[in-house]
Image (cartoon, grey):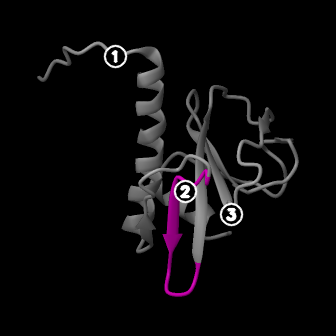
Amino acid sequence: MPVKNSKIKQETLAAHKQLSYENLVSAWLTGDGWEVLIPAIDHGKKTDLVVADDTNYYRIQVKTVESSDNSITVENKWKGAKIDYVIYFSRTAEWGYIAPAFTENRKRLNSPDHIRFHNHPANFLKAFRKI
């Protein structure tokens, strides 16, 4: 069994974990036939992924929350950027939400216009098809 011998800083590990969720969404959407484009850098534009079919492009931001309470309030961290959807994953539970990018500063994660999914490709894709 491989053993990881490197020690990385907590902030670096946090970046690795965040990237793993972005890669998960990318893999699930690619497997469903979407064209997934990954920006070389997303600072300023706040776009983690762009997904496309034959006629539409959607800019997506992927976020995680350190909570198993789906009624928490999440912050708008993409003000001024043109984002279509934000996909939230709970790091402590097996669910997530797909949310249209909102303009308010804060919004309840389980708002009626947000679509909940179980952390599994079939459930995620079923929720994604609803947008």
Q: Amino acid at mark 2?
A: Phe
For the residue labelled by badge 2, is the local secondary structure a helix, a strand or a loop?
helix
Disc assigned to residue 8: 1
Q: Position of residue 55 (x, y in %)?
A: 56, 87
Residue 82 lies, with reference to residue 73, above or below; the image says: below
Residue at image point 43% right, 66% down? 36
Quick one: label 2, few (<14), some, or many (20+) residues within 10 Å? many
> Contact (CB < 8 A) between labels 2 and 3?
no
Counting residues from the start of the chain, the first of labels 1 and 3 encountered is: 1
Kindly identify which residue carries mark 2. 124
Q: Quadrant of residue 7?
A: top left
Camera-side mark, 2 or 3: 3
Q: Quadrant of residue 37?
A: bottom left
- How far apart are labels 2 and 3 at the CA level? 17 Å
Would you say the magenta stretch is mainly helix, strand or loop?
A: loop
Q: From the viewer's side, name the closer residue of 23 and 7.
A: 7
- How far apart are labels 2 and 1 at the CA level? 31 Å
Quick one: label 3, few (<14), some, or many (20+) residues within 10 Å? some
Disc assigned to residue 84: 3
Q: Position of residue 128 (x, y in %)?
A: 60, 64
**Highlighted magenta segment, given as a residue range:** 45-56
Q: From the viewer's side, name the closer residue of 73 and 103.
A: 103
> Contact (CB < 8 A) between labels 1 and 3?
no
Q: Amino acid at mark 1?
A: Ile
Residue 52 in the magenta stretch? The answer is yes
Residue 42 lies, with reference to residue 93, above or below; the image says: below
For the residue labelled by badge 1, is the local secondary structure a helix, a strand or a loop?
loop
Residue at image point 67% right, 59% down? 85
Counting residues from the start of the chain, the first of labels 2 and 3 encountered is: 3
Q: Position of residue 114 (x, y in %)?
A: 76, 54
Residue at image point 13% right, 23% down? 2
